[in-house]
Amino acid sequence: MNSNSFHLDAQQIFEHISFGPLVDDLARMHRESPADLQDMLLEQPGQMDKDYCLIRAAWQGGAALGVKIASVFPANVSHDLPAIHAAYILFDGINGVPVRSIDGNALTYLKTAADSALGSQLLARPDCRRLLMVGAGAMAPYLIEAHCTVHPQIEEIRIWNRSVGRRDALLDEINKGRHAEAADDLAEAVAWADLVCCATMTSEPLIQGEWLQPGAHLDLVGAFRKDMREADDEALRRAQVFVDSRKTTIGEIGELVIPMEAGVISEEDVLGDLYDLCANKTGRQNPKDITLFKNGGGGHLDLMTARHIENRCAPDQ
């Protein structure tokens, strides 16, 4: 295998991958045996905030194993650079031979958005028509596209961001294929929405639970450290809480760690993860319920997405 055929770049990946088949494949893979996982997080103070190196390994015996190395440099946004860069290597699960090098940013965008879309497909009301995107970072256009793919009935999209310039740039991008409008008042926009997707780097909660309307679905993407959260205690109290994986969120991410340590909720209040949801063991009980889904984005999801990419767009051997 030559070096060109070993590596899949972002252009090759996006030419072959669409969210509908990817979400379907993630649902199917969640009915397989779970992968073994191991994470390592290195941190170093940066100019504006701490910089991070995240290493995630996942091994599904007999199928595949993979490792992702991602850098998180929050100050990059002030230099018009993505905050996150990543590389991924997929190995054969039987003999350990390296199979493919995959552009890690493309894989992360697809994995993260498809993870949230699968959650909203299983939990949001089937008649949801109004989507609010909170945050205008690199993930936002992929999250919007993924949610709209699994909810084709969505008719209205609004975008809120602290920086008006970044919000308007995202609006220009989204409006090339869909119609979206600016949201200036976050409280009003959350109350307006059937589906709220939040993908920010905040440590202090942005989403207030009192703003959520009965029947809303809240998709929380951004928090990945134990000191980070995007929704307040009232949101956790009012909602039926679900996660993508119990193993990679409970005790690991501030969205759950902080309210659990404060006694706001307990581990038993997490009603299920995607393994439970895809097995039809749990889910939304009532159209008026508020559902909350924490996207933790563990290494098992990187591996599932890498397997899908390999099957869909690997060059002919």
Image (cartoon, rainbow, N blue to C red):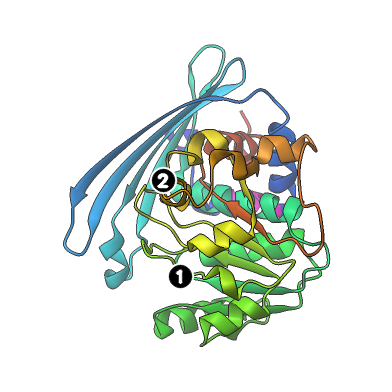
Q: Is residue 171 left or right of residue 313?
A: left
Whether residue 312 is visible: no
Query: Which residue occupies the foreground of this view, 202 or 257?
Result: 257
Comes first in the chain, label 1 or label 2: 1
Q: How many marks?
A: 2
Name the residue at the top extreme: 95
The residue mark sitting in front, 1 or 2, is: 2
State the extent of the magenta-drawn residues as a range.
Answer: 13-19
The spot of residue 197 in percent (x, y) is 58, 65
- Identify residue type, mark 1: Leu
Q: Which residue lies at the image location 52% right of the left edge and 11% below the top edge? A: 95
* Residue 281 vertical position relative to residue 63 in the rendered view, above or below: below
Q: Residues within 10 Å of mark 1 (few under 14, many from 20)?
A: some
Q: Report, in whole angstroms, how far the alpha carbon at label 1 lies from the one at label 2.
A: 20 Å
The spot of residue 193 in percent (x, y) is 67, 75
Residue carrying label 2: 261
- Disc 1, SS: loop
- Identify residue type, mark 2: Glu
Q: Which residue lies at the image location 73% right of the left edge and 41% below the top edge? A: 277
